[in-house]
Structures are given as structure tokens and as C-alpha cells.
Amino acid sequence: MNIPELAKQLATVLGTASVLGYITGYLAMRARAFALGSDPVFALVDAAYVFAGFRFLFVTLLLLLAAVPCVFLLRWGLVSAKALWSPPQQILDWLGIGLLAIAVLWLIGQSLAATGVLLIPPETYSGWDKAVMGRAPLRSLGLCTLTLILFCAALLWAHARWITTPQPLDWPLDWLLGLLLAVLAFLLPIQHGAFFADRNVRVLHRVPDAAASLVPPVAVVDGTADNATLLGRDAKGERLLTTVKREALNGVGVRRIVPLAKFNAAVLPGPAVAQVVATRAEGSMTDGNASTDRAEGSWLERLLAQVQLTIEKISALGDSGIEAGQL
């Protein structure tokens, strides 16, 4: 065994995995902030991106369990259809590229349909707003699984065209195939960030001095190593997102950790907020997870809700603020 060569290969693999984790984690955290409307002033270099990226890769492996059978079923269906109808291969290729392009454009539109959800009253949510808050698992899981299926199918198609049975390059078609494959690859972490990444919030014991315009209850909904984004409401009952320095939270206790959707429902806009109203709203939150809220509906809805809850818990693993030395 060549130990130096093995160590070099291992270092290469770990370096590649770290770069991939950094890129996907950055996209996931950006997509989460875009969907929620938090915008916590991201730094260019942050170890948190790597950890978020590895959580995304872990969740993607879980979704592959559902996607792989669908990919092979799709391949079998296409092969069977080709046996019944055999036009020239070039026509089939361009038809496939056209359908894939339409599907990708539709996926982009749906993936970015929800933005600034935390500032929208829950009673006016659209279907994708509910998906961002974890209230529509059929939408979020279905969209992410469909994207993964198309990515795997396009990857197999590209592998067959470029590696397994190399064909003369059709530059427009091959460029389009490569471009659509890249777009699908970018969509996967974006969807993960929008629908699954860290859906737990920390409810603070009191309002920090730096966020004096807020009234209880207040929670940390997003942040970086230097800043924290707080969600609450002002004295008129209007929703507010406030960014403060991490130092401003020193000495402020965390009362409980609750699902974001639960806390979001507790800060509905209304008339002037008194302490009694705030206490009543905070009391509507429980310490448990969202499984009780998601236990209603058919067996399929309950199953999807449980899968969504599992993915959210995986996506919440790790520290929200990471010191540089930890990496």
C-alpha cells in the first residue's frame, strides 16, 4: 500500500467535498434568506456554508431513495415508447431537449415563487408560501424530488452521449444539455434552502436593547456569525424583521426552541399589542415539534408530513453561528 499516494487521494477527495459543500451551502443559506425575507448580511467566507452544504448533501441522498426508482421507470417508459415510434434520433434528441427546457423553466418559477414570507400574514399565504413554512409537504417534497429525477435523467443522458457511446458533437444540442444540467444542479441546493433548511427558531426571554422597537414575543429566525435577524412585531402589531449584532444578544436568555411555523402563527399582525396579548400569543407555542399540527389528514399526508419533519430536523443539525476556528 502506497501511504503517501493514498493520503494525497484522500486530501483531494476531502478538498473537493469541502468546495462542493461550500458552494451548495452558500446557495442553500441564500435561498433560505430569500424565501423568508431575512437577509442577514452574509459574509463571503463563512464555515457555516460548509456545514449547511453537507446537510444538503445528506438530505439529497435521502431523496435519492425515492428518485432513483422513478428515474429507471422513466427510462423504461422512454425506451418502450421508442420501440413503438422510431423517428430519426436527431428529432428525438431535440424533442427531449425542448421538453427538458420547459420543465426546467417551470421548476425555476416554482422554486422562486415565494419570497419575504415572514412579512406576510399567514391567512394570505399562497401554496408556495405554505411550503416554505413547512405546511405543504406534498408541494415541497414533490418539487424537490421532481428536480432530482430530472437531474439524474439528464445526467444519465449526458453520460450516454459523451462517455458511454461517444457521438459526433451536436454543438447546439450538447451545449443546451450541459446548460440545463448545470441549472438543475444549482436548483437542488436552492430548493433545499427554501423548503427545508433549519426551520427551528429560538424564542428570547426578553427583547434585546438593540431591538427596542419590538415587543414580545421575539425570536432569532436567521443569522450569521456576526449578525442575528429577529422576528417580532411593533406596538401597532405590524410584523418586523430586525438585524442586530450578535453581541447585542449577550445576556439575553433563550426561553424555548420552536418550529418557525408555530412562532410565525403567534405573531399575527393586529391592533396595539399589550403585554397580556403578547403573553397569550407566546403561550400558544409549545415546546414540542410540529408533529401534532401535521398529524391531521390522510395517511399519505401524514407520511409526507413525517418525511418533511425528518428532513427539517436533519437540516437543523449543527450550530447556527460558527467560529472560524471550528473549521
Image (cartoon, grey):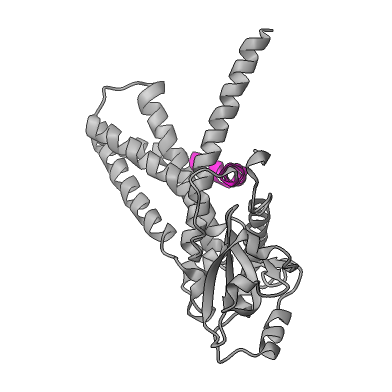
The quadrant in which the C terminus is found is top right
Indicate whether 257 appears above or below 147: below
Q: Nearer the viewer, residue 25 or 322?
A: 322
In the picture, measured across the screen, residue 295 lies left or right of residue 52, that is right
* Residue 112 appears in the figure: yes
Q: Is residue 60 magenta?
A: yes
The x and y percentages for residue 284 are 71, 80
Residue at 51% over, 64% down: 38
The x and y percentages for residue 80 are 41, 38
Name the dominant secondary structure of the magenta segment.
helix
Q: Nearer the viewer, residue 26 or 80?
A: 26
The quadrant in which the N terminus is found is top right
- Which stretch is magenta? 48-72
Residue at 68% over, 10% down: 3
Indicate whether 185 appears above or below 231: above
Determine which quarter of the picture holds residue 67.
top right
